[in-house]
Image: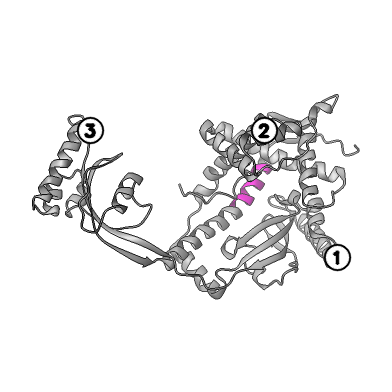
Amino acid sequence: MRRGLFASLGLALVLAVSGVASAAEQPLDRIVAVVNDDAIMASELADRVAQARSQLAKRNIDLPPDSVLRQQVLDRMVLEQIQLQMAKKANLTVDDTELNRAVRSVARNNGMSLDQFAEALKKDGLTLADVRDQVRRQMLIRQLQERRVASQVKISDQEVDRYLAQQGADANVRYHLGHILVALPQSPSPDQVRQAQQQAESLYQRLQDGADFAELAAAQSDGANALQGGDLGWRSGAELPTVFADVVPTLAVGDVSQPLRSPSGFHLVKLLERKGGQDQKPTLVQEQKIRHILIQTNPNRDADQARRLAEQARARIMGGEDFASVAQQVSDDRGSALNGGELGWVRPGQMVPAFEDAASRLAVGEISQPVRSRFGYHIIQVENRRQRDVSDEARRDKVRQTLFQRKVNDELEAWQQQIRAEAYVDERLDTSS
């Protein structure tokens, strides 16, 4: 599984401490939506609407009408509930250790220790258990999205080559974007397409006439970031959704695109800020040319016996025998043993920590004492060291990751639209209140 590539898949694990009124203030509860076999209660909706109000207020975005805000929030709760149901059916779980780590991260992102965070929540009528439950839900949704969407996405070398050729001098540019989506259903009729296009063009004209983008997004957008004023944050060129990729680089800061069509609907994108474009410094890493002998434990050899055999192998080398010959005779790493124990040039992070730490402290040519790792006991020799410019490799790795994220974002949007269309949803929101 690729690490660090799924940050934008799920809901962000950063919760602002906000004065959210408790649903206990409501004297009566009722169902506002049935989602397959589950129900969303009015009290739950009230809590989430209060959170949305607080988030918009912190961003200095004027609140849309209450009925619009409630519908926006309910739509997101319905989609969340569908995904949680799917996660349950898939037997997905969140390990307590992982959950605790994520909650501590939430506290740090709010500039607090865990105890301080708990106290701040208490003052706002919330508990740490409330936040743990919210984070757990977000983590389950992210797991589901990784399994159902991200695992199906592949990036070829040809795609990386093509992107690098297209970007040229703009490869390091980053864009801060705002986004408004007028959504279309799956397999829309011509009338539905025409109505959505007219709505998008109307919103575009309102923006040209001076309407505030964030306020319009909060009130009108069907996008996942609507309640953040449509703020998509900073994106590199490769991280731009495919529908934006050719348009955003042509926008001046403050410009809003004409409506852009994709399978999910019509998009308006605003370039809020732009930075970068300058040449990057070389990326240098220290590589070590290493060879080793591995003595493993097995049913007939315990750890003490393995260590003694490793000591004997070292003694033979120190006594003048050829390292490669000893490796060929006794090393349990048969892949490298056939080549005299050679592992080739190794970069930081490629070996297990115990091995890497020991190798880094050796002088060139020095033979280590037996070093224990989870694989067994190693005798290590660093044959040479060098600094290598891996800028091109690092750039390709970064492009591969960001192209991967772009594809995931595109696929995720379509997948969420599909599961929403396939679910049974009965909304019972009282639009008159």
Residue marked by disc 3: 303
SS assignment at label 2: helix
> Which residue matches tag 2?
118
Amino acid tagged 1: Gly
Eye-nearest disc, 1 or 3: 3
- Can I make out residue 47 in this image? yes
Q: CA distance from mark 1 to mark 3?
A: 74 Å
Please count the marks in the image.
3
Q: Quadrant of residue 135?
A: top right
Mark found first going from the N terminus, 1 or 3: 1
Extent of the magenta region: 411-421
Amino acid on which disc 2 is placed: Ala
Kind of residue at disc 3:
Ala
The residue sitting at the right extreme is 432
Instruction: Give the labeled residue for mark 1.
Output: 210
Q: 150 or 374: which is nearer to us? A: 374
Does residue 108 show up magenta in the picture? no
